[in-house]
Amino acid sequence: MKAIIYSDNGGPDVLRLVDRDRPAPSPGEVRVRVAVSGVNPTDWQARSGPAHPKNFSEVTPHLDGAGTIDAVGEGVDESRVGQRVWLFMAAAGRPTGTAAEFTVVPAELAVPLPDDAGFDVGAALGVPALTAHRALTVAEDGPRRLRPGALDGQVVLAAGGAGAVGHAVIQLARWAGATVITTVSGPEKARLATAAGAHHVINYRGADPAAEIRRIAPDGVDIVAEVALGANLPLDLAVLRTRGTISTYANDGGKPVELNVLQNMVLNARFQFLILYTAGPKARAAAAEDVAAAVHAGALPVGEEHGLPLIRFPLDRTADAHRAVESGAVGKVLVDVAS
């Protein structure tokens, strides 16, 4: 089979296309013929090191993807052979990610994909959708699971609504019944956030974005899904309601975070920092189940017409796919694995 591998941490040039034997599924695992592999910032960060040291002599990257189960290991229901699935956390603590024609994963990381959902949808779920679910289910006064009506009456602010996670926040929050506000930096990203389903789109570079958000939500925002905490914290606190939650999954731009302790005490503000690796298996399993339900409901479409442009590369140009993600490409970067 064809696979992308790297043997040393470094830049995109360490990625190589090689021929390898098809992996055999161990007990409790499934083997998936990968159709599309999704690329996330965590993938290039893991490749680059040194904050993510490589634990295997050879690694096939990428956490997310979609394809068809073609073999199962001992203890896995054989009826799963032929099942269309989306994958998450494939390369987490393992050397076999989705940037290959075949990969093996624990059976619970291969989630059934409805026949009417394309592999592009499946490959775009994973890290963005599960992170978005986590961001929306950690508030003190909010739900722990998502379903239609779970966020009725609540206001969600999705910072950076044109990004992959922001896009998933908008879609999941709207599916669950929230009023969704998002902030963007310009008209093109505003168009994408609107296409994703945001009820209100605010240019944070405008004269007074806090006042605009407060006009929409005079009692304040219940949940902020934050991508750039250092840069956006003043705005977040200006619009957060008492006992509101700031769920932060990144700090784009790297600006240091400084907290006004008294201000946050008076608000009874909750800060929840998010990363899937350490969220725990129960939280990840619940998120996967709810995201799967949203996919079945048609609530997580992708493509430019749905607010998430797809940027495609063939398997032999995976290094270029990594460069695109590293350079901040707007949309979802996908690698087409199947010919």
Image: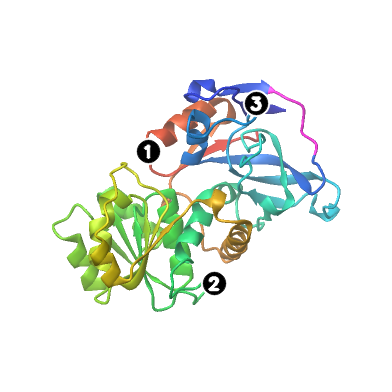
Q: Quadrant of residue 295?
A: bottom right
Residue at (76, 46) in percent of width and height:
30
Q: How is the image coloured?
A: rainbow
* Camera-nearest residue between 180 and 267: 267
Is residue 126 in sight in this rendering?
A: no
Confirm or deny contact between disc 2 and disc 1 (CB under 8 A): no
Identify the element where label 2 is drawn. Answer: loop
Q: Which mark is residue 328?
A: 1
- Indicate which disc, 3 or 2, sits on the residue closer to the N terminus: 3
In three-dimensional space, the C-alpha distance between marks 3 and 1, rounded to whole angstroms, equals 27 Å
Task: Give the residues drawn in magenta, as a range.
Answer: 19-24
Confirm or deny contact between disc 3 and disc 1 (CB under 8 A): no
Confirm or deny contact between disc 3 and disc 2 (CB under 8 A): no
Q: Which residue is mark 3?
A: 58
**Residue 27 in the image: above or below residue 194:** above
**Residue 258 in the image: above or below residue 55:** below
Q: Quadrant of residue 90?
A: top right
Chief secondary structure of the magenta portion: loop
Is residue 220 in sight in this rendering?
A: yes
Q: Amino acid at mark 1?
A: Gly
Q: Horizontally, is 76 left or right of 336 in the view? A: right
Mark 3 or 2: the one toward you: 3
Q: Horizontally, is 183 left or right of 53 in the view? A: left
Q: Which residue is mark 2?
A: 147
Residue at (73, 25) in percent of width and height:
20
- Indicate which disc, 2 or 1, sits on the residue closer to the N terminus: 2
- Residue 267: give x, y in percent of width and height: 29, 71
Q: Amino acid at mark 2?
A: Arg
Q: Horizontally, is 52 left or right of 281 in the view? A: left
Mark 3 or 1: the one toward you: 3
* Quadrant housing the C terminus: top right
